[in-house]
Amino acid sequence: DAGVIQSPRHEVTEMGQEVTLRCKPISGHNSLFWYRQTMMRGLELLIYFNNNVPIDDSGMPEDRFSAKMPNASFSTLKIQPSEPRDSAVYFCASSSRAGLSLGTSGRKGTDTQYFGPGTRLTVL
Amino acid sequence: EDQVTQSPEALRLQEGESSSLNCSYTVSGLRGLFWYRQDPGKGPEFLFTLYSAGEEKEKERLKATLTKKESFLHITAPKPEDSATYLCAVQARSSYKLIFGSGTRLLVRP
């Protein structure tokens, strides 16, 4: 089975340019997450979609960042304009979740997030 | 505030030298604790999920255990191919978010 697919794997751009990162989640998964990883801050959640709807974008650092999920098999993360401090590795992850109701008993095996290979972004 | 602390930051072992990695956490009601392995230039690879204190899971040379305050990843007779960064994350009952620790970089020398 294909895992989470991300493109491009590497992106080098100049400050001020628009950058678009792409993600295809695992087929059948209905939750999608965008993360950013840096040496200083580790892995940080940027935004979370459930059934193609953005649920929480509180981790998006600034208005320069935007994310969309037009259908269940595709999502984009856009940075416009890009800045050198945006340089990082951006990961997309997906999981299978029955619904937004979290409950208290937990649903074993349904919340595991599977990560893509990441996009290494360098902004000069 | 939900928080995860991993120790040590880095660990060097000789092949065959068993050891443990620690993940201490504070969370407002644990939904699950996750262990991932990350190789350089790759995304985190899922290893285990633990849900309640006392639970244990094993996979090859790895064994994960969970208490109410911490989790251990025991590595028995490690091989060089076990070299990687091991990440721990927690998920609270009231949230979908994974809170990650900073990881332990493991190097196993032949």
Image (tube, grey):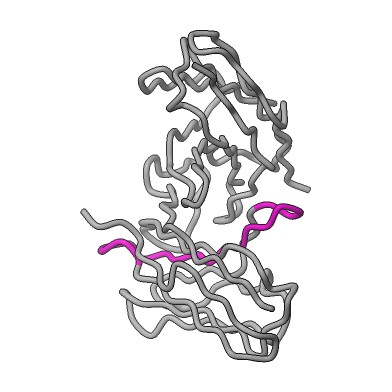
User: Residue B34's spot in the image, x, y percent?
Assistant: 52, 38
Query: Where does residue B85 sit, x and y in percent of width and height?
Result: 57, 37
User: Going by the image, does A9 lie left or right of B25?
Assistant: left
Residue farthest to the front?
B110
Q: Is residue A41 magenta?
A: yes
Q: Which residue occupies 39% across, 73% down?
A: A51
Residue A58: quadrant of the picture: bottom right
Task: Please tell me which residue is depicted at 55% across the width and 84% down the height of the picture.
Answer: A19
Residue at figure coordinates x 56%, y 35% from the top left: B86
Relative depth, front residue between A48 and A101: A48
Residue A66, picture quadrant: bottom right
Span highlighted in magenta in the image: A25-42
Left or right placement of residue A109 versus residue B34 in this view: left
Q: Where is residue A2 in the image (x, y as percent from the top left)?
A: 25, 57
- Image quadrant in which the C terminus of chain A is located: bottom right
Is residue A27 in the magenta section?
yes
Residue B77 to residue B45: above or below: above
Q: Nearer the viewer, residue B57 or A20?
A: A20
A4 up-or-down from B94: above or below: below
Residue A82 location (% of width, % of height): 67, 84
Q: What residue appears at the point 72 percent right and 32 percent down from the top-left corner? A: B9
Q: Residue lying farthest left?
A: A1
Q: In the picture shown, does residue B73 fall above or below A26?
A: above
